[in-house]
Image: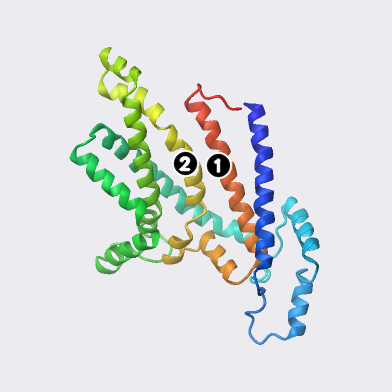
Amino acid sequence: MLKYIVKRILLAIVTIWAVATITFFLMNMVPGGPFLSEKAISPQATAALEAKYGLDKPLVQRYTTYMWDALHGDFGDSLKQRGRTVMDIIGRQFPVSARLGGVSVVVALLVGVPLGCIAALKRGKFADSFISVVATCGIAVPSFVICTVLMYFFGVKLKWFPTMGLNSWKHFVMPVMALSFYPTAYIMRLMRSSMLDVLGQDYMRTAKAKGLSGFVSLFKHALRNAILPVITYVGPMLAYTVTGSFVVEKIFTIPGLGGEFIRAINGRDYTLIMGTTIFLATLIVVMNVVVDILYKIVDPRIKLK
């Protein structure tokens, strides 16, 4: 186990370095700059700003300087939000996205796993067909369509929930529904197919022949093995939802990391783009390592190499 964890950590470092390097050079290949949108700025002022932030230096020198500073936890100052560091922006915006994403993950698991089990147990019946249709719609329909439908019916027509911000529990309802809709649908399909495979195994028939109740055989034997594919998906899902869906945050005007990332891209805020990308990549890699370890805990037969 220890050897595997060390190997994954080393691989994670290489992965994060590759993501940061590719992002840095692609970002600097795009025409334009962070100060071109400034109103009535003179060439002298532009040159002074570029010198202040080191943008007048050769690309390779800027790359080595940035990577060395990032290695020590310094992602620099934002080029557009004067007086604020990248770490300060991430530290302020990420908890908002994390709170919204965490609730969405819990909802997706609490709804997706039971419905997937029900669809498998009621195979070929109305419940199975209905759940399958809902799951297919959840996977096929884009998130911005779901957001628009929710806002129109629950926000504008019925006026049940507010459509902007996260000031109370009511503000969470529609963003959480929109953000958890796709993961819930995907988990339902995963759980259904995995549960159908497990229910057809010999040990399940043996448990039934020994007189075990359906409840015991389902939760003690079937669910533990059937949930392994869901655990695999939880890592990327957690990273996706916790860091915040860009579309959901933009539509519902949520001051999270996703909206900040979009503004950084539109404004060519190089340091904020780099810092956010490295942060998100690190989070995804860490989640994948945690999922692999959970795999071993849930099913001791799995060998980590």
Q: Residue at x 34, y 60 (%)?
A: 146
Q: Report if residue 78 is visible in the image.
A: no
Q: Number of callouts in the render?
A: 2
Tell me the distance, in whole angstroms, between the alpha carbons under discs 2 and 1.
8 Å
Q: Nearer the viewer, residue 99 or 115?
A: 115
Q: Is residue 234 above or below residue 180?
A: above
**How packed is label 1: few (under 14 Cα within 10 Å), some, or many (20 or more)?**
some
Q: Position of residue 130 (x, y in %)?
A: 23, 45
124 and 85: which is toward the camera: 124
Q: Are marks 2 and 1 in contact (CB under 8 Å)?
A: yes
| Residue type marked 2 | Val
Q: How is the image coloured?
A: rainbow
Residue 157 shown left or right of residue 297 in the figure: left
Choose between 104 and 226: the one closer to the eye: 226
Q: Which residue is mark 1?
A: 287
Point 55% across, 37% down: residue = 290
Q: Identify the amino acid type marked 1.
A: Met
